Amino acid sequence: MTPEVHKPHPAWVVAVERGLSGLCTAVSAIGAVSLAGMFALVLGAVVMRYGWSRPLDFTEELCGLLMTLAVFTLLPMTVLKEINIRVTVVSQALPAMGQRVLFVLGQLILWAFVAVFVYQAGGISEFTSMLGLKTEQSRLPLAPFMWTATVAMGLVGVVGVWRTFYPVQPAPEDEVHP
C-alpha cells in the first residue's frame, strides 16, 4: 500500500483555515476561562464553607453556567481539529470511498443538528434577552451565557461545513488509534 501524497492547498484555503483557527482559539479561550473560573469558585466555596463556616450561596448555579459555557465554547476547536471521539469499527472495514461517504453522512447529521440547535437556541436567547431573565439565587443575567453558547454552536456549524470539504490531512507519522 503506497502512502497518499497530498498537494498543498491554495493560498485562500490556507487563509480561511488560519482565520477559522484564530476564531476558534478566541472562542476556546472563553471556555478555558470558564473552566478556570469553575475551579476557583469551587475552591473558594470549600474554603468559605470549612474555613469560615459561611458557604457561598451561588456556587452551584454559577458553576453550572460556566460548565455549559465551557462545553459550547470548546466545541468549535474540537470540530476544527477533528479531535472528537469517533467509532470507526465499520468505516475501517470499508474502502476509501466508503469511508468518505460515511464521513460526509456524519457531517450532514452535524449540519442538521447545528441548524436546529441554533434556530431553537436563537429564539430562546432572544426571549431571554427580551425579558431580562436572571438566575434564581445570584441574579446573574442569563442572556450573555445563552447568546455565547448559541454563537459558539453556529461556529461549530461553519467549521463543520469547512471540514466536510477540507478535512484534516493526517501526517504519515500520526497514529490515529493507539
Image (cartoon, rainbow, N blue to C red):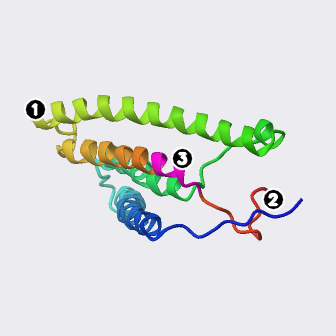
Which residue has dot 2 on it? 178
Q: Which image quadrant for residue 132?
A: top left
- Going by the picture, which residue comes out furthest to the right? 1
Camera-side residue of 40 and 2: 2
Q: Position of residue 84 (x, y in %)?
A: 60, 50
Task: Give the percent coordinates (x, y) of residue 37.
Answer: 36, 61
Which residue is located at x 17 percent, y 43 percent? 139
Evaluate whether residue 1 shows in this view. Answer: yes
Say few, some or many: other residues with alpha carbon within 10 Å of mark 3 (under 14 / 14 to 19 / 20 or more): some
**Image disc number at residue 164:** 3
59 in the magenta segment: no
The type of residue carrying mark 1 is Leu
**Magenta-colored segment: predominant secondary structure:** helix
Q: Secondary structure at mark 2?
A: loop
Q: Earlier in the sequence, mark 2 or mark 1?
A: 1
Badge 1 marks a residue whose secondary structure is helix
The residue depicted at 47 percent of the width and 58 percent of the height is 77
Badge 1 or badge 3: first in the primary sequence: 1
Percent x, y of residue 56: 29, 52
What's the magenta region? 160-167
* Label disc, if present, on residue 131 of the rendered structure: 1
